[in-house]
Amino acid sequence: AHSMFIGKVKIKTPIFLAPMAGVTDYPFRIICKEMGAGVVYSEFVSADGIIRENTKTLDMIKFNKKERPIGIQIFGSNPEVMSKAAKYIYKKFKPDIIDINYGCPVPKITKKGAGSAALKDLCLMDEITSAVIESVPKIPVTVKMRLGWDNNSIIVPKVGSRLENLGVKAITLHARTTTQRYKGQADWKYIKLLKESVNIPVIGNGDISTPDDMIKMFSYTKCDAVMVARATQGNPWFFRRAKAKINGHPLPPLPSLLDVVQICERHFKLLISHKGAKIGTNLMRQHFSNYIRGFPKASKFRKKLVTAPSLEEMKKELGNFKSYANSI
């Protein structure tokens, strides 16, 4: 009932996992996909890095066919470089969607003119967008953006039809300005206004913490899909519950401690096999700190796992956490 299309790509569940730097690597994406995410996105990758064939950059793009439909998100400030990067990604990896990042508020990205700096220079935005679309005629190009640079320069909804006319197949709107970063409230009225101003799908993003928030966003903005970021960190079950909610099924119970342990083990294994012991162990610290919350003694177990100095120690502490979960 709720399927939608982006270009010719059919999406069964209109609940997307947002691209998040340092978070949405293969292990986390595959777990979210299995929990019911309709589309997953790579961490944003640098167009310059792709062209230089930087190994670390290319590793961020690799995906497994089980993850489809998948979007690869790129950023950069040079239309020619962006176009070459998109072409390279298509040739080598064939993702379902290429997404252009016009939303990242981080200064080291924006001061180079990339990310949400494009919101200040719509001519550059036009040039980058057209260059990328021309370079990958076979797959849809989408855009993720913010409202504008600051409260005095909000470019939504007027930029919507401009992007649609260039051939963008969907727009994700994070309903904050660049200067807001991730603080303050997202203003959903702009998602509604954008939806009213274009014929392509609009994906709403910002302040969806629960499946109820998702329903509110759908009904208030009439957006075609939602994209969820922070609420999924340490909580891939979000997708299972949100999917049930949107399909009118009873909500599955919240995860038990044992469910949490099992996903931690799985995530940890995937990270180690995907990134090697040293990097995998380091990356897992952040995930443990997200997963292990909200129960008595959580802080004790979290601290032990996050500070475990080696793979062996971390495995041992995870074992202790598992025994605890089994005992209650």
Image (cartoon, helix red, strand yellow):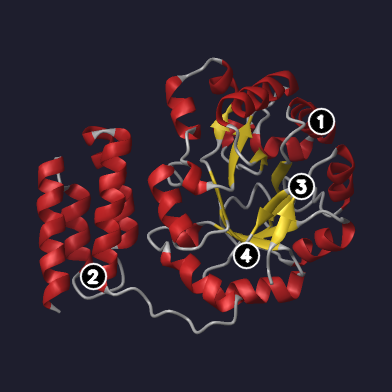
Which residue lies most toward the bottom here? 250
Rendering coords of residue 299 (x, y %): 22, 65
Picture disc at residue 185: 4
N-terminal of the two: label 1 or label 2? 1
N-terminal of the two: label 4 or label 3? 3
Disc 3 versus disc 2: distance between alpha carbons? 41 Å
Question: Which secondary structure lies at badge 1?
Answer: helix
For disc 1, the marked residue is 130
Quadrant occupied by the C terminus: bottom left
Please tell me whether mark 4 or mark 3 is closer to you in this view.
Answer: 3
Find residue 83 and report its image quarter: top right
Find residue 321 and report its image quarter: bottom left
Q: Residues within 10 Å of mark 3 (few under 14, many from 20)?
A: some
Q: Residues within 10 Å of mark 1 (few under 14, many from 20)?
A: some
Tell me, yes or no, whether the two marked residues, 3 and 2, touch with CB atoms within 8 Å: no
The kind of residue on which mark 4 rests is: Gln
The kind of residue on which mark 3 rests is: Gly
For disc 3, the marked residue is 7
For disc 2, the marked residue is 258
